[in-house]
């Protein structure tokens, strides 16, 4: 309740509170500080700062004597100073003529009449509540001082604790706190609060001491009428929503108003407030029960999360264990194959070495025989030697000098299907519930691979098959601007590995399909589509056997309008993008180019760029370009950009470094440059401050274009959004742009319209 009793200006408890016409309260001294004198030349709307006229504004009924203007409320809030609470504070006015006061909470202003602040009624009820609250707090503090908490670090004769550290949970006196717990270094972030007995005393004070004896209430003087200080309030004007005295009724000021006895209205309003409090109390009770429910839910979420994580870890560990066992089996098979090949090669080496040794010995012996000069002796053994040499030559037949085994291993391990299944590992929430549990499915796939490796019987062969039709994952398919993203997966692992996929799209008008992607990925993003078009997409898989059937067709609808910002990925390195890539500036004195994130190929599009900063009369360029335009020179100097560059006095159109159509009129800070790309007529037109600037800049434009800007460090621009834009062609052939709502600097939303 203490916050309800504090002044919004000074932040202290109310002192002499006055009631403003907006039903908020301020201290009388604070009201003097925030009173401001209307500047010369402005005549504020005068009204009486009394209950009658001011409450008429709040009531807003047909019987009000003053309109909203007459009530004195306005929007004039001159700013000079601010208080520590953030409330505007003004020096006190010297006189109350042409003075006004602004409520620090709702910021509504009221003009003061000749009585000044005395025209506002004092809130005696609030003043009494503040006094009672201060008495209760003082009594509670006195009761708490008798059982004060002692300092826990004093060696002898501990004194009363002054603060308690919430992090250390230790009570300190002022001396021990300065010595042992200074507010610097690592202890600077610790929070020091009053001891708990003082906090309890404050709580007792805020609770009004419901269980203890209340301090005696001081007698209050009955409230008197503002216009007749000697008269007490006795009646209540229902029309003016204010208490009045008998003289007010006698003077005829309220003679036509609905007046009721003050006591009757007092009881009636107390009853209404009590009923409203009962409703709020019920809501507060429901809120407490809801908080208990949320706290219980926190515990349940924590427990369920731990349990689910343990289950997930167990499932993944089971998969890893199964894969490890299978890896051990496959490694054993590879080891056996390797040992077999090594044994065959070693035996062949031994056999070949022995035969080579025999052949070499025989050749050496034959060479020695050929050296002999005795014919009879030579002829005696020559026949036998010729037979031996011929027989040795026949031993080196074809195949004898070829390896019996090759270095390659005739083992093929197919993991594509299993890897694809692992990559598709996800939680099933509202998806195909007829699929097998992932653990069983992967174990079955691993088991089938093991069986394939171990059953290499030549008598049993499985016929080859093309891949099945892929299944498009609609939850992952989406469109953004004129780009479409599609994702798919294979329903069942094929017998032969999939080599790739073919994605096809039609032309957006129900025409022929064309291939837009061929590859192994299962996610593809297609850019450069037409806005406001519906594309049919399908995909098929292929392997070494052939091409499989198409998937089901999915319809993708591109955006009706384009949303784009500046593209940091294609911008020059000197370009600086801020404000969520909507504002661009440059670090270089040379012109640098930045492109937009959307591309246009058909339709009519209009967007604007606001000049945020313009120094030293530079000449920024605005227009469209191809995606591969040069980024380190002014826009339009190559043949891939079409632009208008403009300074503070004139402008030119430029394409392929050709300058044409000089036009008078330039830009300054706060100007807007509009670009109208009409791909229906294949033209580009420019606007400055929503007026067409020069003739049609370029014609015969065809292809894909992106918004583009070039600037240097003397310029800063921001994209603007144009909502409900209408493009019309005047009789003179020029365009006229109409806006239904103002232009604001947010995102770009050019709209396709009919010219």
Image (cartoon, grey):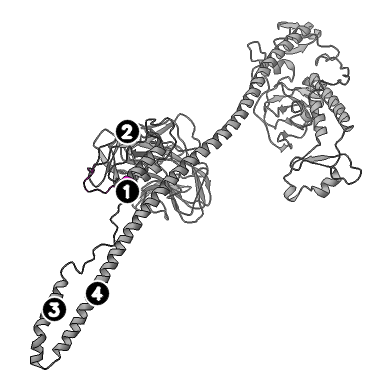
Answer whether residue 209 is magenta in the image.
no
Residue 266, above or below 422:
above
Q: Is residue 152 left or right of residue 587?
A: right
Where residue 354 is drawn, which disc sits there? 4
Q: Label 3, label 4: how many angstroms apart (C-alpha)?
A: 16 Å
Where residue 414 is drawn, which disc sits there? 1
Front-most of residues 571 and 350: 350
Label 1 CA crowd tier, 10 Å (few <14, some 14–19, many 20+)? some
Disc nearest the viewer among 1 and 3: 3
Q: Label 4, label 1: how many angstroms apart (C-alpha)?
A: 42 Å
Q: Is residue 82 left or right of residue 195?
A: left
- Label 2 element class: strand
Point out the stretch of residues depicted in magenta. 450-466
- Asked whether the viewer can see residue 524, the reply is no
Residue that badge 3 annotates: 388
Disc nearest the viewer among 4 and 1: 4
Q: Position of residue 330 (x, y in %)?
A: 36, 52
């Amino acid at each position: 309740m203490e916050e309800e009793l504090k002044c919004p200006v000074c932040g202290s408890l109310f002192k002499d509170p006055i009631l403003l016409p907006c039903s908020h309260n301020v201290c009388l001294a604070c009201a003097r500080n925030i009173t401001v004198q209307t500047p010369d030349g402005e005549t504020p709307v005068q009204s009486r700062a009394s209950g009658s006229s001011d409450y008429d504004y709040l009531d807003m009924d047909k019987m009000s004597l003053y309109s909203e203007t007459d009530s004195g409320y306005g929007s004039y809030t001159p700013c000079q100073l601010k208080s520590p609470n953030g409330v505007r504070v003004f020096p006190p006015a010297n006189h109350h003529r042409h003075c006004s006061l602004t409520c620090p909470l709702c910021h509504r202003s009221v003009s003061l009449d000749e009585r000044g602040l005395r025209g506002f009624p004092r809130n005696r009820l609030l003043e009494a509540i503040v006094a009672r609250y201060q008495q209760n707090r003082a009594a509670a503090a006195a009761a708490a001082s008798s059982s004060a908490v002692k300092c826990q670090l004093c060696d002898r004769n501990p004194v009363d604790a002054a603060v308690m550290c919430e992090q250390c949970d230790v009570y300190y006196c002022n001396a021990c706190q300065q010595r042992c717990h200074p507010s610097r270094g690592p202890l600077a972030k610790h929070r020091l609060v009053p001891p708990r007995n003082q906090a309890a005393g404050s709580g007792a004070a805020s609770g009004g001491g419901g269980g203890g004896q209340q301090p005696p209430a001081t007698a209050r003087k009955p409230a008197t009428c503002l216009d007749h200080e000697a008269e007490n309030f006795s009646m209540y004007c229902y029309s003016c929503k204010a208490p009045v005295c008998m003289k007010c009724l006698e003077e005829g000021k309220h003679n036509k108003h609905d007046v009721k006895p003050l006591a009757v209205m007092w009881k009636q309003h107390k009853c209404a407030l009590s009923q409203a409090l009962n409703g709020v109390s019920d809501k507060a009770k429901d809120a407490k029960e809801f908080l208990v429910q949320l706290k219980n839910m926190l515990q349940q979420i924590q427990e369920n999360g731990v349990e689910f994580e343990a289950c997930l870890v167990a499932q993944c560990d089971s998969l890893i264990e199964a894969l490890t066992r299978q890896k051990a089996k496959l490694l054993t098979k590879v080891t056996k194959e390797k040992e077999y090949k090594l044994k065959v090669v070693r035996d062949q080496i031994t056999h070949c070495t022995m035969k080579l040794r025999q052949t070499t010995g025989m050749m050496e012996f034959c060479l020695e025989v050929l050296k002999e000069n005795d014919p009879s002796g030579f002829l005696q053994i020559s026949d036998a030697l010729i037979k031996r040499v011929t027989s040795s030559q026949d031993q080196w037949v074809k195949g004898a000098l070829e390896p019996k085994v090759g270095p390659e291993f005739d083992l093929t391990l197919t993991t594509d299907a299993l890897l694809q299944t692992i990559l598709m590992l996800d939680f099933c929430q509202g998806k195909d519930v007829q699929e097998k549990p992932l653990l069983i499915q992967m174990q079955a796939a691993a088991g089938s691979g093991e069986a394939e490796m171990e059953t290499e019987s030549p008598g049993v062969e499985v016929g080859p098959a093309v891949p099945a039709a892929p299944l498009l994952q609609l939850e992952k398919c989406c469109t953004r601007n004129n780009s479409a993203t599609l994702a798919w997966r294979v329903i069942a692992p094929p017998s032969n590995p999939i080599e790739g996929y073919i994605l096809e799209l039609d032309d957006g008008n129900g025409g022929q399909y064309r291939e837009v992607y061929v590859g192994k990925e299962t996610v593809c993003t297609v850019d450069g589509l037409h806005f406001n078009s519906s594309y049919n997409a399908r995909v098929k898989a292929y392997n070494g056997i052939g091409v499989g059937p198409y998937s089901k067709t999915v319809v993708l609808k591109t955006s009706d309008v384009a949303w784009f910002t500046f593209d940091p990925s294609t911008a020059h390195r000197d370009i600086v993008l801020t404000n969520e890539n909507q504002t661009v500036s440059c670090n270089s004195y040379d012109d640098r180019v930045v492109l937009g994130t959307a591309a246009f190929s058909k339709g009519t599009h209009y967007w604007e760029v606001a000049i945020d900063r313009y120094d030293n009369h530079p000449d920024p360029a605005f227009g469209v370009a191809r995606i591969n335009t040069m980024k380190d020179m002014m826009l339009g100097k190559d043949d891939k950009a079409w632009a208008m560059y403009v300074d503070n006095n004139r402008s030119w159109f430029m394409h392929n470094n050709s300058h044409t159509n000089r036009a008078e009129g330039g830009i300054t800070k706060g100007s807007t440059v509009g670009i109208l790309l009409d791909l229906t007529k294949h033209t580009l037109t420019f606007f400055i401050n929503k007026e067409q600037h020069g003739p049609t800049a370029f014609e015969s434009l065809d292809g894909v274009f992106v918004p583009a800007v070039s600037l240097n460090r003397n310029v800063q621009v921001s994209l603007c959004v144009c909502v409900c834009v209408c493009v019309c062609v005047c009789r003179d052939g020029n365009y006229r742009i109409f806006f239904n709502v103002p232009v604001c600097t947010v995102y770009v939303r050019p709209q396709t319209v009919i010219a």
